[in-house]
Image: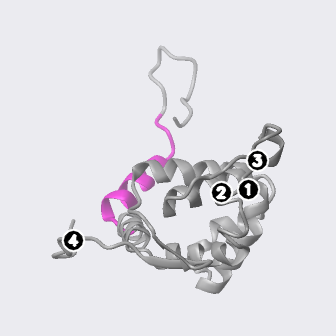
Amino acid sequence: MTDGARPLTWQGPKLEIAGRSYTVRRLGLLDIQRVARIYAAGSAYVNRKALANMNQMSVEEIGTFVLDFIPYALDEVIEFVASLIGIHPGKPEEKLKAEETNEGTIRDPNVFPISGMVDVIGALIEHEDVVAFFESVKRVAKSPALKSLTARLSERSTRSKAATAGPTSKS
């Protein structure tokens, strides 16, 4: 299942935050786990209906939703964003030892001001790997094989053989 030729070289989105240049790295399988952790940390606090209908949201609505989500999974978001742009994540304030600071890390507002988060979210929304991932998910969701599988799973279970104690439940 291919769409044709892809570029032989990949170039990540470039960002400038607080006078420093960053290149957003490629996204891979382990990033799904990181995003799942962020989702798990925040999903108890946000509207699940909004999560289920993200494919119907505009880019602006998705950006706002992500910003609303961040406080519930802040440390997970910081770790993920720091890994995306290749900067040290620092430590939560309560975990710093007496002589430690977060100077020079993503937690330092002189290095990564709040507007930097908006820049990273914008880069992710347009990131080639994110776009390709969601295009693939849409293709799979429209697949006749997937529709056939889900139809079979929703069918009523067959009756049990005479030697069993009654109808079986769906598995």
Q: Tell me the kind of residue under disc 4.
A: Thr
User: Splitting the image into 4 quarters, where does residue 168 fall?
Assistant: top right
Labelled pair 1, 4 in contact (Cβ < 8 Å): no
Foreground mark, 4 or 3, reads: 3
C-alpha gap between disc 3 and disc 2: 10 Å
Write down the quadrant of residue 39 in the picture: bottom right
Residue picked out by circle 1: 74
Q: Is residue 144 magenta?
A: yes
Give the residue at x 57% y 18%: 165
Q: Earlier in the sequence, mark 4 or mark 3?
A: 4
Name the amino acid, label 1. Answer: Leu
**Segment tinted magenta in the rendering:** 142-158
Q: Amino acid at mark 3?
A: Pro
Element type where label 1 sits in the image: helix
Q: Which mark is residue 78?
A: 2
Q: CA distance from mark 1 to mark 2?
A: 6 Å
Disc 3: which residue: 92
Q: Residue at x 59, y 84 (%)?
A: 59
Q: 146 above or below 4? A: above
